[in-house]
């Protein structure tokens, strides 16, 4: 019995490979080998660089549930991280605890109680030139954003507020005790923990 040839209802798809986007430059290309991810040697070099960076930073990336142990240990022993943490807790205490509800101490602008983007901790003696006074409570007062960043005359207002609130003796002390200083890691941890504790006791987190 002669059988008739089978005929497909739908033609076979073309066997030519489809272009796929390069992982680096996103330009379409046709793979020359299985598992190829990039289109050229230049993109392959860039891909290797990115993988190396990812491998070095992976232990420090936050994961679900909080920071990794490696990142927590790094921050606990890194001067820059500790300085930022101590400054953050100190400034928060100035803005939201001690000076909360007060007007801007430079221009007198009313400021709201509680958290606000317009409330900042302004240093009379700058942190750069007078690092010794970075965490001095008499040197730092509540300011509005404009005075702290865009006003050339805000220092005169801060000085007058310091004189009014703390007396001329504090002005004299601050003027004579400035200058640079590099805090030790233990000092930075102590400052951070001190003001973090004050903030928590005041209900500020």
Image (tube, rainbow, N blue to C red):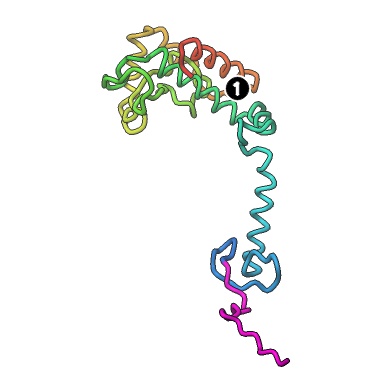
Residue 29: x and y, percent? 58, 72
- Between 28 and 152, which is closer to the camera in this rendering? 28
In the image, farthest residue toward the bottom: 2
Q: Does the segment drawn in magenta span residue 6?
A: yes
Q: Is residue 12 left or right of residue 138?
A: right
Residue 198 % position (x, y): 50, 12
Secondary element under disc 1, as helix, strand or loop, is loop
- Residue under label 1: 183
Please identify the residue farthest to the right as the structure is shown: 1
Q: Residue at x 35, y 8 (%)?
A: 165
Crowding at mark 1 (Cα within 10 Å: few <14, some 14-19, many 20+): some
**Residue at point 49%, 14% (across, down):** 199
- Which residue is pictured at 42% across the width and 10% down the height? 170
Q: Quadrant of residue 166?
A: top left
| Residue 21 drawn in magenta | no
Q: Which residues are magenta?
A: 1-20
Q: Quick one: quadrant of the N terminus?
A: bottom right
Q: Where residue 192 sits: x, y (%)?
A: 56, 19
Q: Quadrant of residue 20?
A: bottom right
Viewer-proximal residue among 96 and 106: 96
| Magenta stretch: helix, strand or loop mostly | loop
């Amino acid at each position: 019995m002669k059988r008739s040839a089978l005929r497909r209802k739908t033609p076979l798809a073309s066997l030519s490979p489809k272009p796929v986007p390069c992982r680096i430059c996103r330009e379409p290309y046709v793979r020359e080998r299985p598992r190829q991810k990039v289109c050229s040697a230049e993109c392959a070099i860039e891909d290797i660089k990115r993988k190396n960076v990812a491998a070095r930073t992976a232990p420090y990336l936050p994961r679900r549930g909080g920071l990794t142990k490696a990142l927590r240990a790094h921050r606990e022993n890194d001067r820059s991280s500790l300085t930022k943490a101590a400054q953050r807790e100190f400034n928060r205490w100035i803005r939201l605890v001690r000076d909360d509800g007060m007007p801007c101490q430079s221009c007198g602008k009313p400021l709201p109680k509680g958290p606000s983007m317009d409330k900042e901790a302004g240093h009379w003696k700058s942190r750069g030139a007078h690092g010794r006074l970075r965490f001095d409570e008499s040197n730092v007062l509540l300011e509005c954003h404009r005075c702290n960043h865009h006003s050339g005359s805000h220092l005169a207002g801060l000085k007058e507020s310091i004189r009014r609130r703390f007396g001329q003796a504090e002005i004299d002390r601050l003027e004579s005790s400035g200058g640079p200083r590099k805090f030790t890691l233990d000092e930075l941890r102590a400052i951070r923990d001190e003001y973090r504790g004050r903030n928590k006791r005041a209900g500020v987190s």
